[in-house]
Image (tube, rainbow, N blue to C red):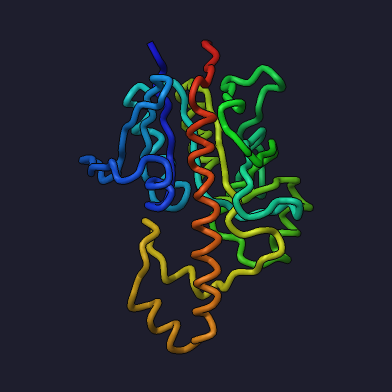
């Protein structure tokens, strides 16, 4: 019997990239979908919304559903200058921002990881192992990314991974995280765009229209962001291939 893999994603685009539109609303408010990979492994994907609180709740629901392993997938900001849009990062450590600083939440146990991926099934895979850091707010500018890279050594930054790792630890479940780079380390994003997106990743159109009227040059910026977001999520098919035949260590 194949194991069930539970994965948390934050945004609708990330969910569609993994599962298409096979989603329905759960009583808890989360959208989730199930599919069976070609090798018979069941994959359950939950769309949590942005941020650690949302991701923690979604991962908790997956744990209660009895999945064999908890993971997360989604777009990230690149901190390592060597990473480009669409490059995949498989986390070997996860850091988190707390009130008293940044601390380690999870670390891969050397070569004997709880989860072993089927990299041979993914063709043309551009990937690397590296630490990921989870922050409370996005890191918008290149200077901030560089400072965070120098401080932590993390190669990618997001807003959800550490919360999923925490639930996995509390539940005694194996954990993994795969992030795809959406904005590279040298890219500065406009902070004014962030309030134009709600916690579910949906555009707040009135805010967005007012912003564009005030700053019409942002249109080209938004188009580039959309292009890079699409390119980053094109790697989802490779992630699905890596999950086929995944081996999960038994505790």
Q: Residue at x 39, y 84 (%)?
A: 210
Q: Is residue 175 above or below residue 199?
A: above
Residue 45 lies left or right of residue 175; in this view the side is left
The image quarter in which residue 115 lies: top right
Q: Find residue 173 and report its horizontal and vertical position in percent.
A: 48, 22
Q: Residue furthest left?
A: 27
Q: Residue at x 48, y 34 (%)?
A: 240
Q: Residue at x 36, y 62 (%)?
A: 202
Q: Find residue 142 and report its horizontal and vertical position in percent.
A: 70, 65
Q: Is residue 62 above or below residue 137?
A: above
| In front of the other: 232 or 206 | 232
- Report if residue 101 is visible in the image: yes
Q: Find residue 136 and report its horizontal and vertical position in percent.
A: 54, 54
Q: Is residue 188 above or below residue 169?
A: below
Q: Residue at x 70, y 47 (%)?
A: 155
Q: Is residue 42 above or below residue 185?
A: above
Q: Residue furthest front?
A: 123
The image quarter in which residue 197 lies: bottom left
Residue 191 lies left or right of residue 203; in this view the side is right
Q: Residue furthest bottom?
A: 214
């Amino acid at each position: 019997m194949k194991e069930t893999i539970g994965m948390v994603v934050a945004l609708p685009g990330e969910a569609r990239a993994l599962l298409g539109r096979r989603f329905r609303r759960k009583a808890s408010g989360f959208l989730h979908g199930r599919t069976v990979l070609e090798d018979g492994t069941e994959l359950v994907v939950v769309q949590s919304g942005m941020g650690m609180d949302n991701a923690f709740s979604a991962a908790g629901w997956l744990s209660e559903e009895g999945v064999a392993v908890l993971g997360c997938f989604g777009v990230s900001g690149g901190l390592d200058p060597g990473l480009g849009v669409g490059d995949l990062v498989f986390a070997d450590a996860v850091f988190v921002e707390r009130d008293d600083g940044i601390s380690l939440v999870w670390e891969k146990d050397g070569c004997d990881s709880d989860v072993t991926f089927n990299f041979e099934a993914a063709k043309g895979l551009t990937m690397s192992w590296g630490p990921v850091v989870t922050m409370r707010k996005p890191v918008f500018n290149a200077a901030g990314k560089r400072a965070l890279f120098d401080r932590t050594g993390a190669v990618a930054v997001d807003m959800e991974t550490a919360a999923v790792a925490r639930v996995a630890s509390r539940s005694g479940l194996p954990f993994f995280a795969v992030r795809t780079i959406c904005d590279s380390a040298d890219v500065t994003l406009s902070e004014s765009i962030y309030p134009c997106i709600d916690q579910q990743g949906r555009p707040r159109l009135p805010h967005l229209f007012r912003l564009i009227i005030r700053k019409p040059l942002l249109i080209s910026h938004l188009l580039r962001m959309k292009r890079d977001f699409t390119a980053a999520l094109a790697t989802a098919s490779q992630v699905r291939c890596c999950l086929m035949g995944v081996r999960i260590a038994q505790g």
